Image (cartoon, helix red, strand yellow):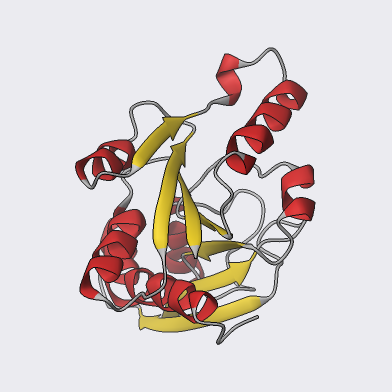
């Protein structure tokens, strides 16, 4: 199975995927391309360091969102991938892409959906909201992407305990280590091996 990984920042989830492929916990999978909307994303360096094609395509470089969406879809189509993995990608996926890749785009979200998800909930904001609410358990969710925001069918979830004195940063790190970096590779492996259709 060929996958494209879309990232906007550091790419720690991308690293978890690369490591899992190397370790053989993800089988039948190769990363064809890593795409970022941010030319300075460290994720692109991670890709290049691992011999993976790294591409930046940003809405800022196009006269409007429509043109960007068309070019973005064309670019992705040129790689003939079986699955698109959103690993901290902060650009809205064009509807045409969602339709064309129906049930072939997955996303990792740093909460137990339906909590702390939807518009405006990304990155540290998710963990800030969880702490404000005083929840005792948070976690991460891997789900299929549909037209909505964090509304697609859930594939895997993993709970993580919130601890006394957590800051958003500390909680974010724990959710990554104990949930995201585990269930995202797991979900990819399940799809690659036909365990999930």
Residue 149: percent from left, percent from top = 69, 56
Describe residue 185's horizontal placement relative to residue 84 as left or right.
left
Indicate the quadrant where residue 158 lies: bottom left
Q: Is residue 17 left or right of residue 102?
A: left
Q: How many marks?
A: 0
Residue 68 position within the rendered picture, expressed as x and y whole percent measured from the top left? 67, 25
Question: Percent position (x, y) of residue 42?
Answer: 28, 38
Question: Outermost residue toward the top?
Answer: 63
Q: Is residue 128 above or below residue 184?
A: above
Residue 7 pos. (x, y %) = 44, 45
* Residue 134 seen in render: no
Residue at the image position 59 percent from the left and 34 percent from the top: 75
Residue 59 appears in the picture as rendered: yes
In the rendered image, the quadrant that contains the C terminus is bottom right
Position of residue 172 in the picture relative to residue 85 (left or right): left
Quarter residue 22 falls in: bottom left
Q: Nearer the viewer, residue 154 or 167?
A: 154
Q: Which is more toward the observer, 160 or 71?
A: 71
Identify the residue at horizontal 52%, vertical 28% (top origin).
57
Tell me which residue sits at (28%, 57%) in the image.
15
């Amino acid at each position: 199975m060929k996958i494209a990984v879309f990232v906007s920042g550091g790419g720690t989830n991308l690293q978890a995927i690369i490591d899992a492929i190397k370790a053989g916990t993800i089988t039948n999978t190769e990363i064809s391309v890593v795409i970022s909307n941010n030319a300075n994303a460290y994720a692109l360096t991670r890709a290049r360091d691992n011999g993976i094609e790294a591409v930046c395509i940003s809405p800022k470089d196009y006269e409007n969102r429509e043109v960007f969406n068309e070019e973005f879809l064309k670019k992705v189509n040129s790689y003939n991938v079986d699955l698109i993995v959103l690993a901290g990608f902060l650009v809205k996926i064009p509807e045409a892409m969602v339709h064309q890749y129906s049930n072939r785009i997955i996303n990792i979200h740093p909460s137990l959906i339906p909590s702390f998800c939807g518009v405006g909930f990304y990155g540290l904001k998710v963990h800030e909201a969880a702490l404000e609410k005083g929840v005792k358990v948070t976690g991460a969710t891997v789900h299929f992407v549909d037209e909505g925001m964090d509304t697609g069918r859930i594939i895997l979830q993993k709970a993580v305990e919130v601890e006394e004195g957590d800051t958003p940063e500390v909680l974010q790190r724990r959710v990554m280590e104990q949930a995201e970096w585990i269930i995202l590779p797991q979900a990819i492996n399940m799809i690659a091996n036909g365990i999930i259709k």
